[in-house]
Image: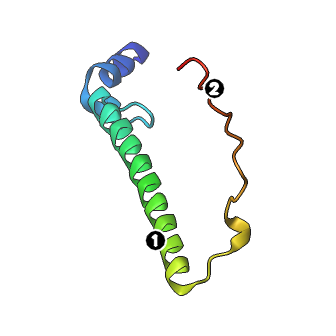
Amino acid sequence: MVTITVATVVFTPLRYYIPGYGDLKQRREFIRLKMRTDSLESAINARDKYLENIKQVINGDYSASKLDTTTIKVPKVDNSTY
C-alpha cells in the first residue's frame, strides 16, 4: 500500500501539490523574477535618492556638512626627462 501511494505521488502530477516540490521550470522562472525585482528595486532607490538630492539643491536645502571638500594630494609630475 505504501509503495503504491508513494509511486502515485512521485510519478503523477499530484507531486506538484506537495509544498516545496515545484516544477523546475517554475523554479527557474521564480529565481529570474526575483533577481529582476531586486535590480528594479535598487534602480528605483537610486532614482529616488537622486531626485531627493535635486530637490534639495533647487530649494537650497543642501547641507555643507555633506559635501566632501577635502583637498586631494596629487603628486607633482617630474618633467626632468623631457
Query: Considering depth in this image, is 8 or 25 the residue closer to the camera?
Result: 25
What type is the residue that disc 1 sits on? Leu
Q: Is 64 rendered above or below residue 17?
A: below
Colour convention of the picture: rainbow
* Residue for point 48% across, 74% down: 54
Question: Residue extending furthest top?
Answer: 3
Query: Considering depth in this image, is 68 or 37 the residue closer to the camera?
Result: 68
Is residue 49 found left or right of 75 in the rendered image?
A: left
* Residue for point 43% across, 17% down: 2
Can you give x and y, in whole percent of width and height, for residue 25 in the image? 27, 30
Can you give x and y, in whole percent of width and height, for residue 63 in the image? 68, 75
Q: Is 51 rendered above or below residue 14?
A: below
What type is the residue that disc 2 sits on? Asp
Is residue 49 found left or right of 32 in the rendered image?
A: right
Can you give x and y, in whole percent of width and height, for residue 56 in the image? 55, 79
Q: Is 67 rendered above or below residue 37?
A: below
Is residue 23 found left or right of 21 in the rendered image?
A: left
Q: What mark, if any, has residue 51 been given in the picture?
A: 1
Q: Which picture quadrant has residue 18?
A: top left
- Whichever of callouts 1 and 2 sits on the residue coming sooner in the sequence is 1
Is residue 9 found left or right of 41 in the rendered image?
A: left
The alpha-carbon separation of the residues under discs 1 and 2 comes to 43 Å
Query: Considering depth in this image, is 10 or 50 the residue closer to the camera?
Result: 50
- Which residue lies under the disc numbered 2? 78
Q: What mark, if any, has residue 39 been given in the picture?
A: none
Of badges 1 and 2, nearer the viewer stands: 2
